[in-house]
Image (cartoon, helix red, strand yellow):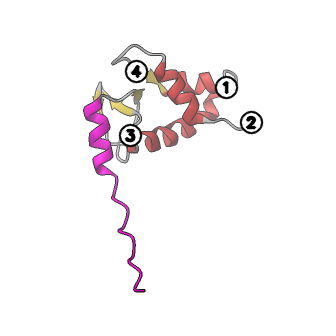
Amino acid sequence: MSVDMEAVILEVVGKLAPGKSASSEEVARAADAEGWRRLTGHVRNTARGLARQGRLTITRHGKPADPDKFKGVYRLRLPTEEERQAALAQVPAPPPAAESGD
């Protein structure tokens, strides 16, 4: 079974009240109620990518966590505008286009 984990994560956190978060288990269960345990790594990896894009906030102990360095139990929620901007500022700018020497 192939799961669009990005869509599942965004659907689950999108239904939450502002500032509320979901556990990785909740997301995995939403994707596959029976086989959710095998999806927890996929949830974590996908959440990291979404957090780097500024589309999701990963929290530990109620505070935003670095998507590349967090360990242990975590929760997921939609980012505040400030968190989104901070995540986008971390994304490297694309290299400038090469000028043609015509």
- Bin the neighbour count of mark 4 within 10 Å (Cα to Cα): few under 14, some 14-19, many 20 and up: many
Residue found at x 40% / y 86%: 101
- Relative depth, front residue between 11 and 40: 11
Measured in 3D between alpha carbons, the distance from the residue under mark 2 to the one under mark 1, in whole angstroms, is: 9 Å
Residue found at x 33% / y 30%: 60
Measured in 3D between alpha carbons, the distance from the residue under mark 3 to the one under mark 2, in whole angstroms, is: 27 Å
Could you tell me the amino acid type at mark 4? Ser
To which residue does mark 3 refer? 71
Measured in 3D between alpha carbons, the distance from the residue under mark 3 to the one under mark 4, in whole angstroms, is: 17 Å
Measured in 3D between alpha carbons, the distance from the residue under mark 1 to the one under mark 3, in whole angstroms, is: 24 Å
Q: Are marks 2 and 4 in contact (CB under 8 Å)?
A: no
- Relative depth, front residue between 89 and 67: 89
To which residue does mark 2 refer? 1
Rendering coords of residue 78 (x, y %): 39, 27
Q: Quadrant of residue 93?
A: bottom left
| Residue 32 badge | 1
Could you tell me the amino acid type at mark 2? Met
Comes first in the chain, label 1 or label 4: 4
- Bin the neighbour count of mark 3 within 10 Å (Cα to Cα): few under 14, some 14-19, many 20 and up: few
Can you say which quadrant of the picture contains the N terminus?
top right
- Relative depth, front residue between 57 and 43: 57
- Bin the neighbour count of mark 1 within 10 Å (Cα to Cα): few under 14, some 14-19, many 20 and up: some
Q: Nearer the viewer, mark 3 or mark 4?
A: 4
- Bin the neighbour count of mark 2 within 10 Å (Cα to Cα): few under 14, some 14-19, many 20 and up: few
Could you tell me the amino acid type at mark 1? Asp
Q: Are marks 1 and 4 in contact (CB under 8 Å)?
A: no
Q: Is residue 94 magenta?
A: yes
Q: Quadrant of residue 31?
A: top right
Q: Are marks 2 and 1 in contact (CB under 8 Å)?
A: yes
The span shown in magenta is 81-102
- SS category of the residue bearing label 2: loop
- SS category of the residue bearing label 1: loop
